[in-house]
Image (cartoon, grey):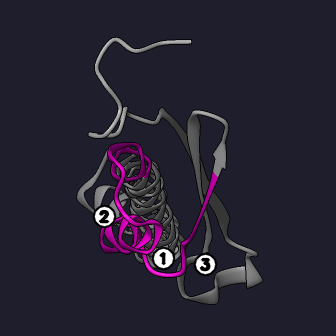
Amino acid sequence: MTRHHRRHHRRRRWRRRGGERGAVTAELALGLPLLLVLTAALVWLLAVGVAQLRTVDAARESARALARGDDPAAAVALGQRVAPDGVRISVRRDGERVVVAARGRMRGPGGLLRLTGVVLQAEAVALAEESAESPVGAGP
């Protein structure tokens, strides 16, 4: 192969690759937003998990306070301090048991795709402790 042919062959090879020029930039421009959305979704799912745990803790703390004989309003206030924003706590007595339900909704990330959000709910049941007036060991 002569010198002229080698140079011409190199030029032709570069011309073929020239059609792919900028392909990496285009792939990166499409891939980065997708990676950002995926990361945001994973962070939101982690936040949902933490909010659900806080909802469970709020119901449990309120149930324990009620079982000890605390005032229902004080027990609900204790649960509200632990619960995520927007969670409502309701209490009821069922015989010797106290039942606390916590329920709320966590919105989607930034209103993205108009997601309805996730329902957070928990229920805790505790057996009411004996009051100080009743003698220990007194039974039916």
Above or below, 12 relative to 66? below
Q: Label 1 sits on what residue type?
A: Pro
Question: What's the amino acid at mark 2?
Answer: His
Q: What element carries label 3?
A: loop
Give the class, few, some or many, for how many residues have Cα within 10 Å of label 3's Cα (few <14, many ≥20): some
| Pair 1/3: label in front | 3
Residue 33 badge: 1
Q: Nearer the viewer, mark 3 or mark 2?
A: 3
User: Is residue 64 one of those drawn in magenta?
Assistant: yes
Cα separation between marks 1 and 3: 22 Å
What is the crowding at mark 2: few (fewer than 14 residues within 10 Å), some, or many (at least 20)?
few
Which residue is located at x 66 percent, y 36 percent?
Answer: 95
For the N terminus, the quadrant is: top left
Q: Name the residue under label 3.
A: 107
Picture residue at 37% right of the left edge, 32% below the top? 130
The answer to whether mark 1 and mark 3 are in CB contact below 8 A is: no
Q: Assess whether mark 2 and mark 1 are in contact (beta carbons under 8 angstroms).
A: no
Tell me which numbered mark, 3 or 2, is placed earlier along the sequence: 2
Q: Which contiguous range is marked in magenta? A: 63-92
On residue 4, which mark appears? 2
Q: Earlier in the sequence, mark 1 or mark 2?
A: 2
- Residue 114 in sight in this render: yes
Residue 22 position (above or below residue 39): below
Between marks 3 and 2, how big is the CA–CA gap?
Answer: 68 Å
Q: Which residue is drawn at 28% across and 19% down?
A: 136
Q: Is-magenta flag for residue 56?
A: no
Is disc 1 surrounded by few (<14), some (14 to 19) or many (20+) residues within 10 Å?
few
x%, y% of residue 15?
47, 71
Amino acid type at image mark 3: Arg
Marks 1 and 3, the one that precedes in the sequence: 1
Q: Is 125 drawn above or below residue 101 in the view shown?
A: above
Using the image, determine if residue 98 lies above or below residue 96: below
